[in-house]
Image (cartoon, coloured by chain):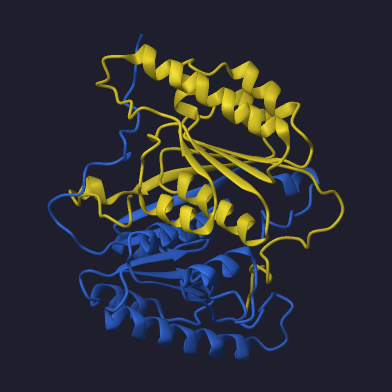
Chain colours: A yellow, B blue
Amino acid sequence: MQIEAPPTGRDTPKPQGERRGLVIVHTGNGKGKSTAAFGLALRAHGRGKAVKVYQFMKVPSARFGEHRMFEQLGVPIEGLGDGFSWKSRDLEHSAELARQGWARAAATIRAGEHFLVVLDEVMYPLRYGWIDLPALLDSLRERPAHVHVVLTGRGAPQELVDAADTVTEMTKLKHHFDAGVPAQRGIED
Amino acid sequence: MQIEAPPTGRDTPKPQGERRGLVIVHTGNGKGKSTAAFGLALRAHGRGKAVKVYQFMKVPSARFGEHRMFEQLGVPIEGLGDGFSWKSRDLEHSAELARQGWARAAATIRAGEHFLVVLDEVMYPLRYGWIDLPALLDSLRERPAHVHVVLTGRGAPQELVDAADTVTEMTKLKHHFDAGVPAQRGIED
């Protein structure tokens, strides 16, 4: 029987040698970018590490399933947006919120008190120009060496891909919306 | 300013109309297949739904970060494997465990008592032929209509992709292992 290499117990080399924070990017048009970031937050928290989740496209009052769980676990998750959509009348307000949110996230990264900082859906304000890409790259480059940062969202800029340690593209092969099946509570939110 | 469609508050259509369980596949060679499944489990649990996680390639005693957290949350997670690796001497034992594990998972799916059943890394025993693909497809087709099933692992068979509602391929664009950076506790396990 021909057996290819399966995952080992941990699906990766054993941790050894260099310990340092990683820049991890989840991009692409498929599902799973944010949920995989939440899974990483869950795992790190399970190892007793300090985690902070910023969500650039969620309002502070968002109460989806993940918010309820993170709250129960004691993982701080913070919505930085204003429910911005392409119908928004006041894009300048959205832009200002994104800038303020980024300032908070950048301060958290720089402070080095967290093992893992998630910047969920940060690609949107980045691509709209509301967050300055060079400033974000500086923040990543100058961060304390032990801090892991996960950035999610479609359309990661090439400069960010270049700067990252690990980049995964989530690609939609098929989606139930395309077959007319609507969003399901508990799955999509 | 040219603005493309960003995510709305929920990044999806509002839940309405048809409510039914979905078959969701995470495949590809990139990271995030399992962690995104864990994120879905977290979200569903946060909505008060019953969730069960089976891990086909983890031993029952696995105590990675996700296990510690799911235990704290009260989400049952069960390793069905024997630490199988390509160095295993006793593949028949691994195969038998996979068959027994699948029987348990199939019974859980059929019973309909869970909103979401995760079959983590089920593609390995499927591709090795330890689990019968037609039997798995039958189980999905005949399941109670409200049950969501998430299946993860590289190399999802085409018949499974055809049968699924939503399929995301996680593709590695780059990975820190390739740059010589080893696995980091709290991120990889």
Q: Write the residue at 29% across / 82% down.
A: B110
- B99, above or below B175, in the image: below
Q: Write the residue at 35% across / 82% down.
A: B108
User: Horizontal and vertical percent for residue A33?
Assistant: 48, 44
Q: Write the residue at 23% across / 45% down.
A: A178
Report the side of A54 relative to A19 (left or right): left
**Residue sticking out furthest to the left:** B17
Report the side of B33 relative to B150 (left or right): right
Q: Quadrant of the N terminus of chain B?
A: top left
Report the side of A79 relative to B148 (left or right): right
Whether residue B29 is visible: no
In the image shown, does B12 or A100 lie closer to the viewer?
Answer: A100
In the image shown, does A26 or B48 lie closer to the viewer?
Answer: B48
User: Horizontal and vertical percent for residue A90?
Assistant: 31, 14
In the image shown, does B71 or A177 lie closer to the viewer?
Answer: B71
User: Horizontal and vertical percent for residue A53?
Assistant: 54, 42
**Residue sticking out furthest to the right:** A17
